[in-house]
Amino acid sequence: MLVDPIKVNLRTGKTTRLALNDIDARAWIADDTGALRIAICTDFKGPIRVLYRASEKAPWQTLAEYQNELSLIFPEASPIEPHWKPIGFAKDNRTLYVLSFLEHDKGAIRTFDPETKTFGPVIFTHPDVEPGDRLANYRSGGLGSRKAFYGLVFNPQGDLVGIDYTTDRAMTQWLDPAAAKRARDIDAALPGTSNHVVSTTADGKLQVIVATSDRDPGSYYLYDTEKETLTALGAARPQIKPADMAEMRAVAFPARDGTSIPGYLTLPAGRPEKKLPLIVMPHGGPFGPRDVWGYDPQVQFLANRGYAVLQVNFRGSGGYGLEFQRGGYRQYGLRMQDDVTDGVKWAIAQG
């Protein structure tokens, strides 16, 4: 079902249609003025097309066309093609930031000039994981008022200052020394938690920080960047006592074909780590999402009742590169299930 993009006035509730979706667009990207300039289009039967226009009055033109990933799950799949995905506009409202899989299995953040159709140099790539966070791309903030799409972190002036990625835990590669120092100062003041800016004033002087961990669902602080002070605002779930929660450990084990499979193991707090009843919690999707380190109420509930909980990022899980994700395509009950089973056997072997 095709839908038209609309703009909503949050004060009055008035809606304005921005475009008539007659191009099979499934996603849109606007520039800093709010003009829709990029459309990702598909009818799900054919390829995915990336369309671009120089202004809202300019005609759409095709920037790229690549295979629909959904077709790889079905027998009629065509050969896998290199591709890239647009993320958003830079502050010049011309340059695009893109996630490119043209030369990198794990993807690379680059710039792209849609007028000349040329790529800039690689800004960031990682040998083990993709940029961004497959589960937390909804998180807004970074160090500015924009969203951290695919892990891109901007300051209030619109400059790219960092890139998020997730190995065993959420990490950030800082591109700006000032942003890196500020992050180090916040981490020093809030040790043992993963700390992120989730809201900020337009000038960046005041920021709301959320501090989370595998045992803490989140505590919020107000950070004054000029005074360099943190003020506690409150806890997301004050009834949860982090000291009473169980630790989530990153693990990895060899599958039967030798592939290293990552995951997380949570053991009951205060109990011997031997001969525990084990529950396996596979994540959803199954293609694309992955489990991440952090507070999970279901996991903590089960650990509190004496169970060990194993979460396996089996092949097909996202974030580990195209080869790893595509390793799960058409593998329902086969390789995907084998990875989970091999995880259970590994846990048994650990006692």
Image (cartoon, rainbow, N blue to C red):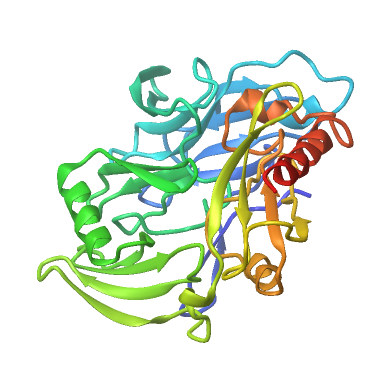
Which quadrant of the figure has residue 340? top right
Q: Does residue 10 lie above or below 315 as drawn?
A: below
Left-right relation of 67 to 186: right
Foreground pick, 240 / 63: 240
Foreground pick, 197 / 194: 194
Residue name at image x 51 percent, y 62 percent: 214
Foreground pick, 23 / 30: 30
Which quadrant of the figure has residue 176? top left
Residue name at image x 21 percent, y 47 percent: 180
The extreme left residue here reads: 227
Q: Does residue 213 lie above or below 260 as drawn?
A: below
Q: How many labels, in total?
A: 0
| Image coords of residue 115 (percent x, y) | 39, 22
| Image coords of residue 329 (percent x, y) | 79, 29
Foreground pick, 246 / 78: 246
Is residue 60 something one can see in this rendering? no
Which quadrant of the figure has residue 227? bottom left
Left-right relation of 202 to 199: left
| Image coords of residue 293 (percent x, y) | 53, 54
Left-right relation of 59 to 41: left
| Image coords of residue 29 (percent x, y) | 50, 44
Residue name at image x 61 percent, y 65 percent: 296
Q: Does residue 148 lie above or below 77 as drawn?
A: below
